[in-house]
Image (tube, helix red, strand yellow):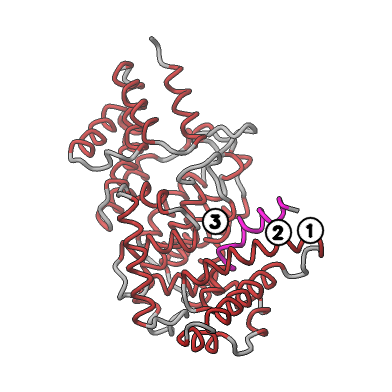
Amino acid sequence: MQKLIDDIYRSHSRRVLATLIRLLGDFDRAEEALHEAFAEAARKWPRDGVPDNPMAWLVSTGRFRTIDQLRRRSRFDASMKDIEDSLYPAQEAEIGDMDLIEDDVLRLIFTCCHPIIPADAQIAMSLREICGLTTEEIAHAFLVPAPTVAQRIVRAKNRIRSAGIPYEVPDKDQLPDRLQRVLHVIYLVFNEGYSATSGADIVRTDLTAEAIRLCRTLLALLPDLEVSGLLALMLLQDSRRAARRSATGEIILLADQDRSLWDREMIREGLALIDAATGCGAVGYYGLQAAIAAEHARKRKAEETDWHRIVGLYGLLLIARPSPIIELNRAVALAMCEGPAAGLAIVEAILSRGELRDYHLAHAARADFLRQLKRFPDARLAYEKALELCRQQPEKAFIRKRIAELPE
């Protein structure tokens, strides 16, 4: 039973939290209610059995536990009485409505992405509340101290509370203004699932599935080429999931993957979306990334990959949205066309500018180029730097394997 509750917490707690935030109107109160609800489940479900609708049960239990607490406090604090009264109107139909619960995560993303909240706080709060990442994990992802992230989140919550920002998807005429931020958050959710920041597994399928579901919902609300581009990108990347790990959990690089394990249905849908977008002649940031993923998806063998075209697409991405991460990815593609020295020159230029110094994949790429150039002592040092910065167990194991394979 405890494993079942743990699985439900892992897979559905962020959706339950999103609904509690809507019903209780407060992030902190909702977090407390969420933990109360799961604690109650651990006490009651082994005795009474799992309810027919566990998510609705958890939302209802969390909400009423909060109301009970407010009632007790209101005996001593008159201000609590007003909050209790505001929460008490019957909303049972809403709580039991699974469609509303499903959409609450999207409402929460739009709330976190409200224009009055600074962009860095929007992302930090979204990763905290929607992905369930800890403050330390977010700090590591953004290469900033944990207290900085904590302050951003607290300030963002205070702004939402003081400005009375509603927990809702805005009207259609307001959707385009917030679209890029919302797409960014959905892609962050997907990325955290596709390559987890830390932990024993590189994949969190609950997050990749949730990001794809959210993007489908958004596309239904707002048919837009960038939304369909992001959906195509996520489908094409997620199609490789079964081939990315060995039976023992070891990472398998793209070039070494068994492509017969790739999900052909996801590929078919992703290619149809990106082909429709390119057919319109208007491909945006996510569409370009999807076009790169499509280049891999169309080939049955790694050696058939058109790396020159991929380098060109990365060049367009750099024009659309300059970024050292994209520059790093282009360096890897360029090395496939012109050799490791070309890739190494770009990566060392990025690092010499002080960018990506704490990003383990930049050091891992540099190490790999050095290894291919047979500069083994330099490669060892670069791998060791990547290992020092890496927090994910499968990636650590992969880097250790690379180090062990180097000649003495």
Magenta region: which residues? 2-16
The quarter of the picture where the C terminus appears is: top left
Q: Which amino acid is tagged 3?
A: Leu
The CA span between labels 1 and 3 is: 28 Å
Residue 215 locus on image (x, y percent): 51, 66
Residue 340 locus on image (x, y percent): 31, 27
Rendered residue at 56%/73% (across/down): 20
* SS class, disc 2: helix
Q: Which amino acid is tagged 2?
A: Ala
* SS class, disc 3: helix
Whether label 2 touches label 1, CB < 8 Å? yes
Rendered residue at 47%/38% (across/down): 392
The numbered dot on residue 207 is 3
The CA span between labels 3 and 2 is: 24 Å
Q: Is residue 4 magenta?
A: yes
Q: Earlier in the sequence, mark 1 or mark 3?
A: 1
Residue 395 locus on image (x, y percent): 47, 34
Identify the residue under disc 1.
Answer: 46
* SS class, disc 1: helix
Which residue occupies the extreme front position in the image?
76
Q: Which amino acid is tagged 1?
A: Pro
Identify the residue under disc 2.
Answer: 42
Residue 76 locus on image (x, y percent): 50, 82
**Tally of marks:** 3
